[in-house]
Image (cartoon, grey):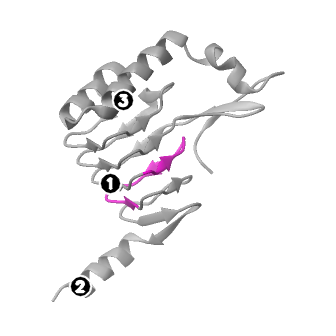
Amino acid sequence: MRKTDRYPVDHANSLWKVYHTVSFWKVARNFIVIQMARITPFFSVKNWMYRTFLGMHVGEQTAFALMVVPDVMFPEKITVGNNSIIGYDTTLLAHEYLIGEYRLGEVRIGDRVMIGANSTVLPGVTIGDNAIISAGTLVHKDVPPGAFAGGNPMRIIYTAKEMEARRQERKP
C-alpha cells in the first residue's frame, strides 16, 4: 500500500473541493512555472525553477527531460536525489482526488535513478537508489534500491541482486 494521507469529503466529489485544499493562486503560479520548465532545454535552469518556485527537493546533476510534469498542486512533496534522470513526458503526482476522498503522499526518488519516458509515478511511492523504471510504467508501489521495474501494472523485473548477476554474465 502506498503511503498517503486520506481526507474524506462529503457531498460532491473531492475535485469540487480542490480550492479548499490548495490555493487557486498557488496552483496558477505552479502551472505557469511547470509549463515554462517543461520546454526549458537547460537542466540547471529547470532544477532552479523547481527548487525556487515550487519548493521541490532536487539533487545535484538531476536531469528532468523535456515535457516532464511535476505535481501542480503539491510539488513540495516531491524529492528527487542526485544524478537521476526523469524521462520525457513523465508525470510525478503527489495528490489524488477521488469521489469520496482525496489523498496526499510524498514522492521520494533516490540517487542515480532512471525513469523511462511516459511513466507516471503515483503519490506515496518511494523509488530506491540505483533503480531503473522502464518507459511507460505506472509506478503504483515502492521500488527497492537497484531494482529494474516496468509495466502497467508495474512489477519488479529484476532485483538488485539479479541485475548484478546479469552484469557479471556480460563481462568478458
Q: Which residue shows up at 71% across the image and 20% down it?
A: 16
Q: Which residue shows up at 54% across the image and 12% down it?
A: 23
Q: Position of residue 119 (x, y in %)?
A: 46, 51
Please report whichever mark, 3 or 2, sits nearer to the chain's N-terminal start.
3
Q: Secondary structure at mark 2?
A: helix
Q: Position of residue 88 (x, y in %)?
A: 36, 47
Say what amino acid the circle numbered 2 marks.
Answer: Arg
C-beta proximity under 8 Å, tags 1 and 3:
no
Q: Which residue is mark 1?
A: 113
Magenta segment includes 106: no
Q: Secondary structure at mark 3?
A: loop
Q: Which residue shows up at 24% across the image and 27% down it?
A: 48
In the figure, 159 relative to 154: above or below? below
Magenta segment includes 121: yes
Say what amino acid the circle numbered 3 marks.
Answer: Met
Q: Which residues are magenta?
A: 118-133
Q: Which residue is mark 2?
A: 170
Residue 60 quadrant:
top left
Residue 105 quadrant:
top right
Please report whichever mark, 1 or 3, sits nearer to the chain's N-terminal start.
3
Q: Residues within 10 Å of mark 1 (few under 14, many from 20)?
A: many
Please report whichever mark, 2 or 1, sits nearer to the chain's N-terminal start.
1
Q: Which residue shows up at 44% across the image and 51% down it?
A: 118
Point out which mark residue 56 bears: 3
Q: Position of residue 132 (x, y in %)?
A: 37, 61
Q: Viewed as shown, does residue 107 lie left or right of 129? A: right
Q: Secondary structure at mark 1?
A: loop
Report the quarter where the C terminus lies: bottom left
Q: CA distance from mark 3 to mark 2?
A: 38 Å
